Image: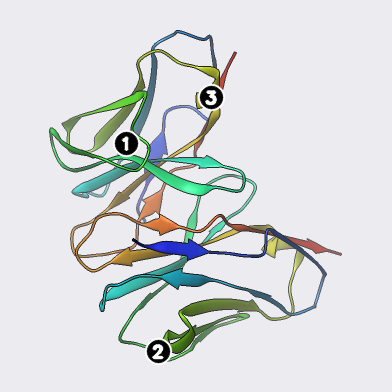
Amino acid sequence: DVKVTQSSRYLVKRTGEKVFLECVQDMDHENMFWYRQDPGLGLRLIYFSYDVKMKEKGDIPEGYSVSREKKERFSLILESASTNQTSMYLCASRNRGITEAFFGQGTRLTVV
Amino acid sequence: AQKVTQAQTEISVVEKEDVTLDCVYETRDTTYYLFWYKQPPSGELVFLIRRNSFDEQNEISGRYSWNFQKSTSSFNFTITASQVVDSAVYFCALKSEYGNKLVFGAGTILRVKS
C-alpha cells in the first residue's frame, strides 16, 4: 500500500512564525503535491513538485514556499505565518503515468 | 479553464436509503480523467474511482455505482443502501491528460443517520 505520511496532525503557531510542514511518501513517486482544504472551497493546489529540486506554483502559492531535496520528502514552508493561513493542509503523491493521487492524513494548522 | 461543481453542499439520509452525489465538470480537453475521493472524519482522502473520458461505461462496485455522461458533463456517484460508515466528505476531481494538477470540487458532506 502507498503510504503518505505528514509529520503532524495538529499544529498551533503564532503569527509571524516560520512553519514547516513535512510530508514523506514511501512509493518512489515522482510527483508530490501540497493542497489546502477550506470549507466550501474544496482542495486548492499550493505547489507541486515533479522531481527532486523541481517545483511549480499551483493556484494559491502566495505566502508559501516548498522544498524537495530528496525524492521521498516534500516540505511546505510558511515563511511568516498569518491567521488567514489557518487551514487543513494535505500532501499527496502520484506516480508518473498513473493518474490517481494518494493523500496523507492532513495537518490542521491554526495560526493565532 | 477546468472546473468541477458539486452543487450539493450537504446531504442527510437515513440508513438504507439510496443517495446520489452530483458532479458536473468543465474542460476543453478531449482526453481527461475524473475521480471520486472519500474523506472520512480521520482526514485522509481515500481514492474510490478513476474514469477516463473515452470510457463512458458505468461502473458498479458493491454498493457504489458511478454514472458518467459526457453529453451532460456529469459524473455522478450513487451509494445504495447507505450505511453510517458512509458518512464522510466526498470530492469529485478532474485532471487533463497532460497536466499534473487535480482540480477538485468543493465537496459534498454526506451524513447517514441510524
* Tag 3–tag 2 contact (CB < 8 Å): no
Which residue carries the number 2 mark? B56
In this view, the residue farthest toward the bottom is B57
Q: Secondary structure at mark 3?
A: helix
Between the residue at mark 3 and the residue at mark 2, the CA separation in whole angstroms equals 41 Å
B76 over B111 or under it: above or below: below
Callout 1 and callout 3 share a chain: yes
Q: Report the mark closest to the observer, 3 or 2.
A: 3
Return the mark for residue B14. none
Between the residue at mark 2 and the residue at mark 1, the CA separation in whole angstroms equals 35 Å
Give the class, few, some or many, for how many residues have Cα within 10 Å of label 3's Cα (few <14, many ≥20): few
Percent of width and height locating residue B97: 23, 69
Q: Amino acid at mark 1?
A: Val
Percent of width and height locating residue A101: 35, 56
- Quarter in which the C terminus of chain B is drawn: bottom right
- Quarter in which the N terminus of chain B is drawn: bottom left
Query: Residue A26 sits in which quadrant?
Result: top left
Question: Which of the chains bears the disc numbered 1?
Answer: A
Q: Is residue B30 visible?
A: yes
Q: Secondary structure at mark 2?
A: loop
Residue nearest the viewer, comparing B72 with A104:
B72
B99 over B65 or under it: above or below: above
Which residue carries the number 3 mark? A84
* Tag 1–tag 3 contact (CB < 8 Å): no
Q: Amino acid at mark 2?
A: Glu
Which residue carries the number 1 mark? A24
Residue nearest the viewer, comparing A6 with B69:
B69
Question: Which of the chains bears the disc numbered 2?
Answer: B
Which residue sits at x=65%, y=47%?
Answer: B41
Between the residue at mark 1 and the residue at mark 3, the CA separation in whole angstroms equals 26 Å
Q: Report the mark closest to the observer, 2 or 1.
A: 2
